[in-house]
């Protein structure tokens, strides 16, 4: 299975730049998610790879083959659309069979009535039917082959779209938000199904989504995009622990990362709202932004005074929403339900960060040194 | 909670309210739609002529007379030829126009309006223009024919060509309607179906048309065929103004025969019988349309 390589892809719609030089490589057999808010260019990027859209600049390679000049059908890719794009007037079997028919039968053999009279058509059609069955059965579609898409549930339609993409063993799968039309329960099932399918087939997959939890849960690596730029390409855990950019840090993780404005002295000491923090910045001084995950905050007597405004009990954890004097918005702290029991809301506490990520005012990552812990 | 069976009095009151609420629709339906149709059927079963003081129940006499009326059969045959040619011509040309206009980058609105003008204009007035166009000597059509070396004819006065000249005018008039309906159908086709098709290996114009456009236009097609068929059955103005059914009955059509019998010769009951035949055809088309649409349940 070949990988996919993009070099410096640029695209404008009118005068609006949508992609500003995106380069990335999808390894052979890798499941790569392209994650970003709507309008970040992720779908356009996928459509350029597919050949449904032409780039204004840059190169697309599938394996070692440059495909920019090739039409969609010659790129040997399969796409799963957000709307599934099933042909409503064809049965499930006909939908899945179409890609095979287009490739295996000559244009004469595909003609109605006349095609059936030509030599070889029959055995080719039987072969296609066998292959359709082979794909449909593991997806649980064998009993639905005679139905029209309108007679299927959302989850079943989604599986038909997958089957149509899989049936001719393409070089890579392109998936454009394939789960966003499913309800939450089905989505979890479909996630698992797509992962196990692509793992089993070992096929390179590009998966576009705006749902960070989907990208994190499914992908080997995640490419985070914003404003037509690739911000970071990394495995999910690295993206979470080590974001190179404030936008990435904000986009990944739930609840969202807390951002505290901090001041750095010329010695590298760090304060927030006049309170010393147990970190030192290595180089810069002046204002900066400190990113704190909800689980990296402790309640500690040396911390910054805060007031609990709301408790969000999620069962396995409790999110404590706090207000800190002088800070806009709330700071969220993640506690075990037992640890949160003592609070009912509106208590005053003190928050001390134990681990943090530092960014400058432009959102670029800055190095940080954890100073000696302030012991309890 | 325990379910309480409504008392019979309450149930009767509810039923009464239901009838009262549907009464306005019921009255309107009969007064506007069913009443006139039934009156025509009843009238066709009498011997009443316009202006007469009395009428007699005549049973099927009018229909028996129709059966042996040479002009009626000519009229029916001409109408069927008219519909049989003008419907496919209108549908095919309307579809071509819609596809062409959809494919141009600029000036869609202009082309749309241009094709739609004949639909919106009065055919009676436009008939004047067509009379001039078909004029044997100064008419544009003969001038053009002569210029490119085709035979010329006195189109409207020749029994062999008059009906076809009228068909051409009919197609010209209904083309815009078919085009507008097809364009509406075309814009409703999701773009990603074409994209899925090109991913699946088909991106030629013919494949796109055959695999997506044509099947997706199914409901529009049924509707366009039905509406052009009904409008074609109603051909009257051009006949009345340009040919008066002639020459030698070659453009005699159902509605024209009906108007002649009912209003010129004042044979109201006979005219009513022709109207009933006309209504049967219209009803038949509507029925076929309904059946065709119900069989296509997959467009949910």
Image (cartoon, rainbow, N blue to C red):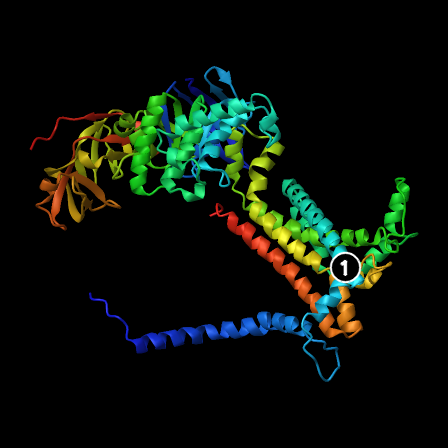
> Is B230 in front, or is A280?
B230
Residue that lies at the very extreme toward the bottom in this rendered image: B53
Q: Position of residue A270 (x, y in %)?
A: 21, 32
> Is B127 in front, or is B113?
B127
Give residue A197's quadrant in the image: top left
Badge 1 density bin: few <14, some 14–19, many ≥20, Cα 10 Å: some
Q: Which residue is mark 1?
A: B73
Residue at the spot x=57%, y=45% of the render?
A: B218
Residue A176 in view here: no
Q: Is residue A181 placed above or below A49 in the rendered structure?
A: below
Residue that lies at the very extreme toward the top in this rendered image: A64
Q: Position of residue A293 (x, y in %)?
A: 22, 35
Residue B161 in view here: yes
Q: Position of residue A95 (x, y in %)?
A: 47, 34
Q: Is residue A364 left or right of residue A322?
A: right
Residue that lies at the very extreme toward the right in this rendered image: B137
């Amino acid at each position: 299975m070949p990988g996919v390589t993009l070099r410096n892809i640029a695209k404008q719609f009118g005068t609006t730049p949508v992609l500003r030089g995106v380069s990335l490589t999808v390894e052979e057999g890798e499941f790569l998610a392209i994650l970003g808010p709507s309008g970040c260019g992720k779908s356009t990027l996928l459509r350029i790879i597919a050949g449904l859209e032409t780039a204004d600049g840059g190169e697309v390679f599938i394996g070692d083959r440059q495909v920019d000049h090739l039409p969609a059908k010659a790129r040997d890719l399969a796409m799963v659309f957000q709307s599934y794009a099933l042909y409503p007037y064809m049965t499930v079997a006909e939908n899945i069979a179409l890609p095979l028919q287009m490739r295996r039968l000559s244009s004469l053999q595909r003609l109605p009535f006349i095609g059936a009279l030509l030599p070889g058509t029959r055995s080719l059609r039987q072969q296609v039917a066998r292959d359709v069955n082979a794909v449909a059965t593991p997806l649980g579609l064998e009993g639905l082959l005679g139905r029209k898409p309108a007679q299927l549930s959302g989850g079943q339609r989604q599986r038909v779209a997958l089957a149509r993409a899989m049936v001719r063993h393409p070089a890579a799968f392109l998936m454009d938000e394939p789960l966003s039309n499913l309800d939450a329960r089905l989505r979890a099932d479909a996630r698992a199904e797509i992962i196990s399918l692509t793992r089993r087939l070992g096929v390179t997959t590009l998966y576009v989504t705006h749902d960070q939890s989907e990208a994190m849960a499914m992908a080997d690596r995640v490419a985070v995009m914003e404003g037509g730029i690739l911000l970071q390409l990394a495995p999910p855990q690295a993206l979470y622990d080590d974001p190179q950019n404030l936008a990435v840090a904000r986009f990944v993780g739930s609840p969202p990362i807390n951002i505290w404005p901090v001041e750095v002295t010329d010695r590298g000491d760090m304060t927030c709202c006049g309170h010393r923090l147990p970190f030192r910045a290595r180089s810069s001084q002046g204002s900066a932004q400190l990113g704190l995950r909800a689980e990296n905050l402790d309640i500690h007597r040396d911390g910054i005074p805060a007031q609990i405004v709301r408790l969000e009990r999620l069962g396995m954890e409790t999110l404590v929403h706090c207000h800190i004097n002088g800070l806009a918005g709330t700071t969220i702290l993640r506690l075990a339900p037992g640890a949160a029991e003592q609070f009912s809301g509106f208590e005053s506490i003190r928050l001390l960060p134990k681990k943090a990520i530092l960014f400058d005012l432009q959102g670029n990552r800055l190095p940080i040194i954890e100073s000696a812990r302030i012991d309890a | 909670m325990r379910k309480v069976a409504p008392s019979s009095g309450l149930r009767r009151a509810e039923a009464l309210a239901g009838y009262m609420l549907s009464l306005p629709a019921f009255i309107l339906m009969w007064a506007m739609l069913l009443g006139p149709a039934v009156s025509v059927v009843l009238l066709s079963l009498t011997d009443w002529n316009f202006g007469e003081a009395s009428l007699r129940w005549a049973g099927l006499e009018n229909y028996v007379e129709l059966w042996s009326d040479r002009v009626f059969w000519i009229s029916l045959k001409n109408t069927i030829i008219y519909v049989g040619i003008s419907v496919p011509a209108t549908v095919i040309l309307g579809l071509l126009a819609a596809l062409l206009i959809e494919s141009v980058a600029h000036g869609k609105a202009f082309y749309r309006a241009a094709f739609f003008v004949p639909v919106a204009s009065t055919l009676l007035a436009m008939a004047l223009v067509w009379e001039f166009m078909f004029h044997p000597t100064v008419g544009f059509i003969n001038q053009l024919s002569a210029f490119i070396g085709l035979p010329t004819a006195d189109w409207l006065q020749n029994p062999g060509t008059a009906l076809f000249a009228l068909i051409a005018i009919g197609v010209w008039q209904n083309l815009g309607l078919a085009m507008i309906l097809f364009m509406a159908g075309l814009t409703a086709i999701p773009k990603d179906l074409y994209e899925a098709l090109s991913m699946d290996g088909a991106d030629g114009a013919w494949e796109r048309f055959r695999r997506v456009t044509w099947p997706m236009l199914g409901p529009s097609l049924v509707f366009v065929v039905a509406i052009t068929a009904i409008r074609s059955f109603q051909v009257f103005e051009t006949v009345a103004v340009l040919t008066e059914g002639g020459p030698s009955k070659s453009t005699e059509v159902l509605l024209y025969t009906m108007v002649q019998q009912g209003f010129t010769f004042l044979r109201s009951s006979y005219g009513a019988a022709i109207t009933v035949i006309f209504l049967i055809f219209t009803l038949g088309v509507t029925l076929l349309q309904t059946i065709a649409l119900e069989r296509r349940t997959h467009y949910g």
